[in-house]
Each structure stands twice: as C-alpha cells, then as structure tokens.
Image (cartoon, grey):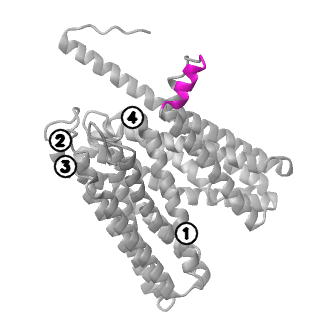
Amino acid sequence: MSAAAGNGHFGWVGIARLGLVQACLGSVVVLTTSTLNRVMVVELALPALLPGVLVALHYLIQVVRPRMGHGSDVGGRRTPWMIGGMAALAVGGVTAAAATVWMSSQPAAGIALAVVGFSLIGLGVSACGTSLLVLLAKRVVENRRAAAATIVWMMMIVGFAVTAGVAGKLLDPYSPQRLLAVTAGVSVIAFVVTLLALWGLERAVDTEPAAAPSAEPGASAVPFKQALAQVWQDAAARRFTLFVFVSMLAYSSQDLILEPFAGSVFGYTPGQSTQLSGVQHGGVLLGMLLVAVAGSGALGRLMVRLGMRQGSDRIGSLRTWTVGGCLASALALVGLVMAGLFAGAWPLAATVFLMGAANGAFSIAAIGSMMSLAGQGQTSREGIRMGLWGAAQAVAFGLGGIVGTGASDLARWLIGSPGPAYAAVFAFEAVLFVVAAWLACSIGAVRESHAAVADIDRSRQSGVPVLSVQ
C-alpha cells in the first residue's frame, strides 16, 4: 500500500508510519522520565527533587522548538530533522541511564552527566516532534486531521505502555547492567524503527509544490528572529500560543495531585488510586475517538440522515470540540471540587472518567486546530508556528507539576483540611480551562476577521464587489 493518497497528501498508511515515529519517541521518553526517576529515588535513595529538576530541564530545553522549526522551514525537508532528533534522543536516553548508574558511586559526576543526557533528550524531542507535526500539518487533508492526530497520539500511548511493560519485566531483578542494557536496547530499536518508518515517506508525496501559495518569495532566507517576530505579529498565532499554554497548564497541573487527592480524601489505597488513573486514561481514549469520528464527518452525515441538518456542519468543527472540551474539563473539575467538599457522597470514579473524556476531546481537537493554523497567516512558516506552540506546551508541562503540587501544599497549609484544600486547587484549574475556552473562541473570531479583510482586498484588486450577509 502506498503512503500517499494523491495530491501530495498522506494516506492512512503514511499517517500510521508517522505514528510509529511518535511511538518510538514516547518509548525512549517514558524510560527516562519514569524508570530512571524511580531508580534515583528508590534504589539510589536520592532526593525526589533531583529527577524532578531533570525532567523539568528536558521541558525547559524545548524552548528551542521555534528555532528548530525555522531550520526545517529553511531546508524545506522534515525527515532529516526527525532522524537527527531521534538520534539525539537515543543518545540522550543512554547517557541519562549511564549517569544514573554513575550516581551510585560518584553522585556529583553522575548528576553532571545526567544534565547532559536530559538536555539531549529535550533537544531530540524538540527536533523530532516539531518536524513530525509540521509534516502532518502539510500532508494531511483537513477532514482527516482529527483522526490523524488521534492515531499518532494513540500510537504514542501504545509506545509508552509496551515499553513500560516489556522494560519492566527485563529490569527485574534490577541491576545497573540491566538498566544500561535495556535503555540502550530500547534506544537502538527506536532509532532503527524510525529510519524504516521514514524511508522514502516524504519523497512519496513530493508531488506537492515546494511552497504554499501564501509563501513570500525568498521567505526561507529571512533570519530566525525576524521570522519569529513576523509570526508573533499574527494575532491568531499569538492567541493560539496563549491558549496552548493556559490549557496545558490546567491539564498538567491536575495530573500529579489526582492520586494523592484520592488517597488523602477518599482513603484510596495505592492500588485503587492507580486504577483510578486507568479510569481517567480510558476516558481520554474515548474523548480522542469521539473527536476523530466527528472530525471525519461521520457524525455530521449521520445527523443529516436522521433529519438533523441544522448543526451537522458544526458537529465536526475542531473549534467546537476545542471550546466544548475545555468547558467540559472545567465542569468536570467543578465536580472534583464537590468531591473535595463532600468526599463520601460524591461519585469520584465517574467524575474522573468524564474529566478524562473532556481532556482527550479538547487535546485532540487542539492538535487538529494546530495543524490547520500552522500553514496560515501572512507567510507560510509551519515550522516556526508549530515550534512556538510546542514550546508553549513544554513550558506549561514543566510548570504544571510545580504549580499543581505547590498550590496543593500551600492550600493545605492555609486551610488545614485536605478536602477543601484540594477543592481550591481544582477550582483554580477549572478557571484556567474557562480562560482557555475563551481564548479558543477568540482565535476563531480573529481568523474570520482576517478572512473578511482578505476577501475585501481581493475584491478591490479584481473590481468585483463582496456581498456581506449579516
């Protein structure tokens, strides 16, 4: 089967091949952010702050995403950046594992090497992840973008799950040699699979023109700072950056406090709270699938057949699902606020499932919107736009854990009782989601305004009047 679907676009096979790359990226990252984290804290008895700082470092490094996106824009090819990024990620993963082993005998030297390893991980994720999203944005037709985002992200989750399960068995019983061997094995496999998945993929759809119609002559030769300034001047791109930051901050800040909340307020055991996380992830999967089906137009066609023509167009709108998902996430967090205030009488598992579904819906819709917006604007700078939004997400994720856990500690100190303290934090996160929904609405309004101005300009040039229906 061919990776191309005609007109320079990817078919489902091409999308799945990019999903394999995302799965490989996730498989290396999960080892470094979870397995090495546990080894440092449990086996080596080091402070939990150390892996926390290292993971935050790999997020902080990702502020270079716009620069890497610009590099791929200038070169016009995304595959070298994905391969180079995966190589850096693989080397960084092995370096981080070696550093963890070294910490047992020489902590200072091991920590210094870990800084290098986690920095390489951040650089690798930036280069590979940014170019992968740009390639999806350029080569996937609009009505497949939500489904493509779902496929790619589900494959990344599969990469997380398979690597965690297999590596966990291979690491038992633990030894430093096993840790190095397993990490090196996963990194090598991830790199080889990436090479095979990308082999000839970008060339297979190179029938598409090299530049979009909106691109300016010589745009690729513009220096990075000037190109970034041009993108930031676009109101829609700027607001979408703020939307990504606010929504991802709200999304990530509840992640680290949900299980402690279930244990402290509802008396869940570690096993029960882990199962609660499974319930949440099940909801996320459902939300992703709903948006994928809606984005493909299947729900709209079903509504037309049932005689519900009004609203059939909006049901597949990524903007509708983005705004609705944010508002539904806020509503679910209000449910968690109630759970904190009325612990025993509130259905916690159902609330968490609904929150997961809302989170999954808004996140996939946001990724689809990101893909649509990447090539829009006064100049075609997909790499910088995607890099800018990726950097906003990374910074939000890095801050999210600190904000969520720090706010919960502060609230418990101020309020005393754990239930109302957690409720206050969940209420703050709900407000963030409402702000994110407002930003998502405003992005659509800005785009419509830009389109209207463009129509007027074209009308003036052609001499044909534009009729506006209010």
Q: Residues within 10 Å of mark 1 (few under 14, many from 20)?
A: some
Q: Is residue 86 left or right of residue 23?
A: left
Please name the residue that numbered disc 2 is placed on: 219
The number of callouts visible is 4
Please name the residue that numbered disc 3 is placed on: 223
What mark, if any, has residue 142 been given in the picture? 4
* First reached walking from the N terminus: tag 3 or tag 4: 4
| Residue 281 part of the magenta-drawn span | no
Q: Residue at x 44, y 84 (%)?
A: 110
Residue 161 at x, y percent in the picture: 55, 63
Q: Residues within 10 Å of mark 3 (few under 14, many from 20)?
A: few
Please name the residue that numbered disc 1 is placed on: 164
Element assignment for label 4: helix
Quick one: quadrant of the C terminus?
Answer: top left
| Residue 299 part of the magenta-drawn span | yes
Q: CA distance from mark 2 to mark 3?
A: 9 Å
Magenta stretch bounds: 297-307
Q: Which residue is farthest front?
A: 1
Image position of 459 with respect to 26: above or below: above
Query: Disc 4 vs disc 2: which is toward the camera?
Result: 4
Residue 330 at x, y percent in the picture: 64, 40
Q: Residue at x 38, y 49 (%)?
A: 13
Verify CB contact (< 8 Å) between mark 2 and mark 3: no
**Amino acid residing under circle 4:** Glu
Q: CA distance from mark 3 to mark 1?
A: 42 Å
Verify CB contact (< 8 Å) between mark 2 and mark 1: no
**Amino acid residing under circle 3:** Pro
Q: Nearer the viewer, residue 99 or 172?
A: 172
